[in-house]
Amino acid sequence: MESGIFFSDYAKDMTLRRTPAQKIRLALAIVFAVAVPWFASNYQLTLLNQIGIAAIGAIGLNILVGFTGQISLGQGAFMAVGAYTSGLLAKNMGIPFWVAVPIASFVTAGVGAFFGIPSLRLKGLYLAIATLAAQQIIQWVITHWDFVTGGVDALVIPAPTLFGMRVNGEFRFYWIILFCLVLTIIFTVNIFRSKVGRAFIAIRDQDIAAEVMGVNLFQYKLLAFATSSFFVGMAGALTAHYRTIISWERFTIETSILYLAMIIIGGLGSVSGSVYGAAFMVLLPALLNNFGRAMHGTIPAFDQIIPFLQQGMFGIVIILFLILEPEGLVKIWRNIKDYFRLWPFSY
Amino acid sequence: MKRFSLLIVLLLIVLVAATACGGGGATSDTGPIKIGGIFDFSGPTSGPGTPYGQGIQAYVEWKNANGGIAGRQVDLISQDYAYKVSTAEQLYSQYVGEGIVAFQGWGTGDTEALRGKIADDKIPFMSASYSINLAKIDEAPYNFLVGTTYSDQMVIALQWIKDQGGKKVAILHHDSPFGQSPVPDGEAYAKANGIETLTIAMPGGATDLTPELSQVESFGAEYIIIQNVASPAALAVRNAKDLGMTAQFVCLNWCADESLVELAGDAAEGVVGTLPFTPPSVDVPGDDDVRAFVASKGEDLNKLGLHYTQGWVTMEVMAAGIEKVIKDGKPVTGENIRAALETISNFDTGGVTAPITFTPQSHRGNKALKLFQVQNGKWEAISDYIESSIE
């Protein structure tokens, strides 16, 4: 019978997987990720791929919002920077996608850092408005810089190839997304065991105290914007190659808000929470759609209002979350684990 | 524990339901023909999207009640997607897994996003997005356009203006792929024909277009062409009346409908529209079936409006392609439907549209339409078919 998890040295305290149960769960997750595409239908793979891309973007946003405490409404635009950079490199210069995606991520990191400059002076709502400006400016540039981006027309990108094989279809692209997601998770989990990560968290908790302790605010805030945008750009670039056709309409302010909702529901300041939040926000509309379909025809008078019920449900579930568990899915998961670990004496 | 047990249950339902669906077999030789559809019943474009989707559903119901397509029933698997591209992608992929052989889309967003996938999956696709880009066979080999393209509409409007002796034209457009689509073709035509143009993007969500219209007035425009949806167009028409402007308005198809008349009231009087689909206020033989069908449901086609007929006819053209495949004794696959559609020549929609022709070189259904004008609150035809000069 244990009453908690305790360590007798710092090395153990710093390990990522501390208990046997955690190691088993990680192993199960790996087996699941590798095995599932062989059994899943195309539709299920579409959902998984959408979740994967959303998770990378949500982790990126969480680095900025959840860990560093800097709010951003420019998520959609930063994804667009990644998507268009990667897409244009592949289309116009014939650069293979596995080179174009990292380049696009770095470009987005630069753009993100640039638009992060106001964060030195602005906080909270004011910073939100400044990043909203970034969203609008980038969107305007994409739709009006016809010469480079093709303006408002959709950008058609050649299907990616890897080792001479055309990577089209859900199954093949699943592996690419999985690879990028795993890299993102490993990097992010580890960054918060380092000096940089601790500086981010110090800024979030109390920026004046952080500065007094020797954290260079300007440098670390920009670094947070750059790191965050790097992954957001990667998510955008993957979207471009996955869909092989993109238009600016995919990256509007609505996208920014959707991603904020993901990390709030999943859990602010948590890597696994970002993944749960992404999965939730992709699966919920799919579930509501399937529910609507199942209901179709059962009560004829009901048919007309099903679409509106779906929209309403979406809002209700989010509100329920905020009221019942503001710390998000990750906290719910932790509660479940604690409940079973400490059972039957759960307090 | 109780606090979150509810949420756990919710989550489990999400996971189970989302993974349980999907799968299913392909269309067999005798069973129903599966066609996918996504409509906007609850999103930002649900105004015209609802009657359009209902028109498609109604055609399928009517056809099935009358023996189906060459004796085979049609199973239209369709849902509301609220104009969300990611939902459109999910539904599309789900329906393909269930063995659909053709697809009915709706807006610019979903049509553009899916055009690569449908080419890979070989699924013929029709939607209410009439951008001329979709007519490029090499880029969009499975998209078919039943309506006259926006570019053709624009050029037809300018041809008419030229015949009226117009020299100065303002083009107001929605600032989006949909809105900008016909602008370059229109400007090129105007330049070649000695018409001066002023192009202005209409700001989204505007509640007052007086600044833009003042610009148009000082330019001295005799005609104003609008490529936008009905509510901003109605706003422009009303503002212009308040300013005492006398310029003639010409609306392309998405702003020329019944809701423009409803929203702009008296100010809409005299507005000209380039309408690929004849509104129900004008009686044509092609409307007989749809009129009888909605009457049997206790509804009035004039109230449902022209977007209802638009959906009906779009589905009718798709059904014509499928019928040909069955009559030729070939299996009903996306590839065969595409080939059959490409043999459709001068398909008569009974006066609802100009005759529809598809060839392997062109999926532009037609290049001609009639001009209509609001007279006493109703759209009335004011011209015969005018053909666009774009090749």
Image (tube, coloured by chain):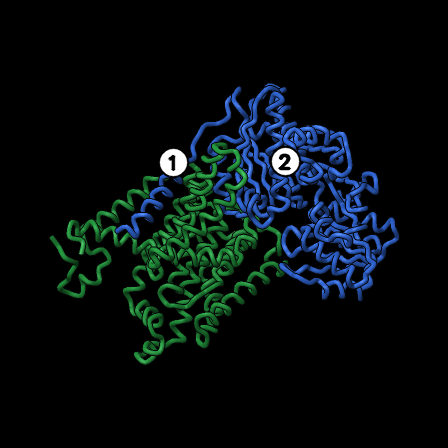
Chain colours: A green, B blue
Q: Whole-Å distance between the Cαs marked 1 and 2?
A: 31 Å
- Report whether B156 appears left or right of A218: right
Residue A256 lies, in percent from the top left, at 48, 58
Quadrant in the picture for residue B305: top right
Q: Are marks 1 and 2 in contact (CB under 8 Å)?
A: no
**Residue visible at 62% across and 59% down?**
B205
Q: Secondary structure at mark 2?
A: helix
Residue A46 lies, in percent from the top left, at 44, 42
Determine which residue is flagged by label 1.
B20
Chain of residue at mark 1: B
Q: Secondary structure at mark 1?
A: helix
Determine which residue is flagged by label 2.
B55
- Report whether A331 appears left or right of B262: left
**Considering depth in this image, is A21 or A258 the residue closer to the camera?**
A258
Residue A301 lies, in percent from the top left, at 53, 36
**Considering depth in this image, is B84 or B150 the residue closer to the camera?**
B84
